[in-house]
C-alpha cells in the first residue's frame, strides 16, 4: 500500500476516522503549544492509550507502532512525544518522518521514487536544499519553470 503525504504512519493503530478526528483536533496546536491549553489533547492521548495500549500491544506506541513506549502516561514512544510536545510540529505522519521504514510513500514532486523526508525522494530533496527552496510545492514550481533537471543526488 502506498501512502500519501500527511497520512497516518504505517504502524498506526487508529482507524481512518479516529486519525482524521485526532488530526483535526491537533492542527491548531502546531507551532502554538505554549499559548494553548494541552489538557484536552493529553486527555485524548490517554484515552487512546487505554484503547490501543493494553494486552498484546502493551509497550508499543499507538501512533507509529514502534516500541518501546517511553511516555507511559500517553502510550507514545519518545519520538512521537517529542515531535508533538517539545517541537510543536503536530502528529508524526507520512512524509514528515525520515527513514526507509516509511519509504512506501511516493515522492510528491516526481511521483516516481519513495519519499524519504518532507514528502520528497532523495533527488527532489537534494534539489530543494541546493536551490534554497522551502517545500515540495516550490520544488515542483521550480522544475515546471524549466530551471532544474532531476539528476542523481550525487551529481
Image (spheres, grey):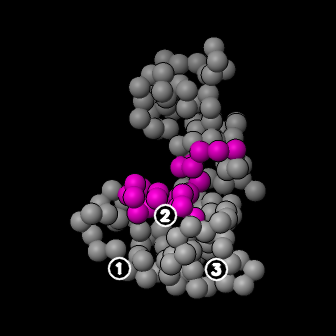
Query: Earlier along the polypeptide chain: callout 1 or callout 2?
Result: 1
Residue 80 on the magenta span? yes
Q: Between marks 1 and 2, how big is the CA–CA gap? A: 15 Å
Checking the image for residue 81, the label placed there is 2
Q: Quadrant of the N terminus?
A: bottom right
Mark 1 near mark 2, Cβ–Cβ under 8 Å? no
Q: Secondary structure at mark 3?
A: loop
Residue positioned 58% across, 18% down in the render: 149
Measured from the top left, where is residue 113 in percent x and y? 70, 36
Measured from the top left, where is residue 86 in percent x and y? 39, 58
Q: Which residue is mark 1?
A: 39
The quarter of the displayed image where residue 26 is located: bottom left
Q: Residues within 10 Å of mark 3 (few under 14, many from 20)?
A: many
Q: Secondary structure at mark 1?
A: helix
| Residue 145 appears in the picture as rendered | no
Asked if 124 appears above or below 32 in the picture, the reply is above
Q: Between marks 3 and 2, how big is the CA–CA gap? A: 15 Å
Query: Earlier along the polypeptide chain: callout 3 or callout 2?
Result: 3
In the image, is 112 to the left or to the right of 40? right
Q: Secondary structure at mark 2?
A: helix
Q: Residues within 10 Å of mark 2 (few under 14, many from 20)?
A: many
Checking the image for residue 53, the label placed there is 3
| Residue 58 appears in the picture as rendered | yes
Amino acid at each position: 500500500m502506498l501512502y500519501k503525504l500527511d497520512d497516518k504512519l504505517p504502524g498506526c493503530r487508529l482507524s481512518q476516522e479516529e486519525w482524521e478526528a485526532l488530526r483535526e483536533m491537533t492542527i491548531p496546536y502546531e507551532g502554538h503549544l505554549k499559548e494553548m491549553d494541552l489538557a484536552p489533547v493529553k486527555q485524548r492521548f490517554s484515552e487512546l492509550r487505554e484503547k490501543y495500549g493494553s494486552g498484546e500491544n502493551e509497550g508499543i506506541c499507538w501512533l507509529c507502532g514502534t516500541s518501546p513506549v517511553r511516555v507511559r502516561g500517553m502510550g507514545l514512544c519518545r519520538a512521537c512525544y517529542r515531535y508533538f510536545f517539545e517541537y510543536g510540529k503536530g502528529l508524526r505522519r507520512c512524509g514528515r518522518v525520515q527513514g526507509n521504514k516509511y519509504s512506501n510513500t511516493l515522492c510528491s514532486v516526481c511521483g516516481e521514487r519513495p519519499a524519504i523526508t518532507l514528502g520528497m525522494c532523495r533527488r527532489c530533496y537534494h534539489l530543494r536544499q541546493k536551490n534554497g527552496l522551502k517545500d515540495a510545492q516550490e520544488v515542483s514550481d521550480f522544475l515546471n519553470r524549466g530551471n532544474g533537471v532531476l539528476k542523481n543526488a550525487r551529481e
